[in-house]
Amino acid sequence: MALPPLGSRHLLARPLRSVPGLVPLLLPLLLALPVWAGANCPCQDPALCRPISHHPDFEVFVFHVGEKTWKSYDWSQITTIVLFGAYDSELMCYAHSKGARVVLKGDVSLKSIMDPNFRASWIAQQVQLAKAQHMDGINLDIEQELSCSSPAYNALTALVKETTDAFHREIEGSQVTFDVNWSPRYTDRCYNYTGIADACDFVFVMSYDEHNPVWSECIAAANAPYDMTLTGYDDFIKRGVNPKKLVMGLPWYGYDYTCLSLSEDHVCATATTRSPPCRGVSTHQVPYKIIMKQVNRSLSGIQWNKDQKSPYYNYKDSDGRIHQVWFDNPESISLKAAYIRSHGLLGIGMWNANCLDYSADPIAKQQTEDMWKALKPKL
Ligand SMILES: *[C@@H]1O[C@H](CO)[C@@H](O)[C@H](O)[C@H]1NC(C)=O
Ligand SMILES: *[C@@H]1O[C@H](CO)[C@@H](O)[C@H](O)[C@H]1NC(C)=O
């Protein structure tokens, strides 16, 4: 490994050669130095390894799960990119060149965080990793069940506060965020939402996976119905969460349900309602890029459900079974995004950017562009 030029760090200016006995002792320190000194920058322009300090008025918070398709993302909008896939230094350099933050994903067992020493060492590790990779913060994605009486209830709020303090102190301008369920009410996660939102830079609300077939007479329905989604935000705000701490998270994927029967008015029964209710519902997630390929071969073409303000379609698989697919498109996303302006939320984001088709096909290109454009809330 090449050492940084002498004199670039004052510690290195000492004549090491004259005290050979010290070299073995200093070597680990020397090796660690470039990491926290911001050296070892993989970018062509070393300035691109500096963390982003600008705080945008409007957040566009993007989850990236892998692959090189990030080159085709709409970088004119992105303010933060969360790396759920492997670290990619080229992506870091590129994001920084566009003024966008690149942040870690953080997950830790709620059982372990009750020990303050464990929290401190876990946080220190995350800060070190972020520094070593020239990153700008961390997104805490702790999607674990928690009861209100659990001792982890307060420990979780403490973890968020301590993580934020450590990152802000160690990486100038850095950002710490936390992912929350679509609703503070309909969840098995009893978190101190106000405390958590206050303790970090903002929370990302996962407004998807809202439909539970068991609650709705075992029929297929939207991933993020309009009214339900917005009620979730109303509830966070009623509990005292500052709207400026809320980023609306929308799905770029849908749900494919196998129908036991399909009525004339397109009601797809997914199971029988006899007890246990809705046993054996067959459903899986499907990304927007697959949906848009499949819709032209569908039985119905794109339909619109007025109550849920969501598109869907029906198709027949190769075994002759009928399916119903519910998803979000620019139309349903724009409707929900209007709430961001009317209620003063901080921004928007999606799970996840890789769900779109970034191929050269002109139809796919247009559809992908339209999805990115739908993130801009209309005035
Ligand atoms: C939430 O956390 C804050 C900060 O720690 C605390 O002041 C508040 O009492 C907590 N609220 C609830 C409902 O536990
Ligand atoms: C699907 O059909 C529409 C309307 O006929 C057409 O404009 C579009 O190009 C088709 N999409 C694909 C991917 O073939």
Image (cartoon, rainbow, N blue to C red):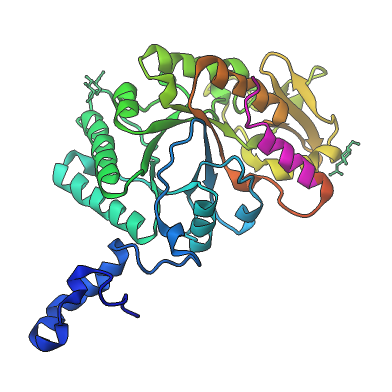
Dividing the picture into quadrants, the one containing residue 69 is bottom right
328 over 241 or under it: above or below: below
The region drawn magenta spans 364-379
* Left-right relation of 289 to 184: right
**Magenta span includes 91:** no
Query: Percent from the top left, x then y, of residue 87?
Result: 46, 59
Magenta segment includes 377: yes
Vertical placement of 271 versus 89: above or below?
above
User: What is the x, y in percent for residue 269?
Assistant: 69, 24
Considering every residue shown, the one lying at the far front of the view is 7
The image shows residue 354 at horizontal and vertical percentages of 61, 48
Q: Depth check: 208 or 365 in front?
A: 365
The residue that appears at 57% across and 31% down in the rendered structure is: 250
> Where is the C terminus found, in terms of image quarters?
top right
Residue 114: name its quadrant.
top left
- Report the side of 4 relative to 345 (left or right): left
Q: Residue at x 29, y 42 (%)?
A: 168
Q: Residue furthest top?
A: 238
Answer left or right for 325 relative to 156.
right
Q: Quadrant of ligand 1?
A: top left
Could you tell me if residue 260 is visible in this image? no
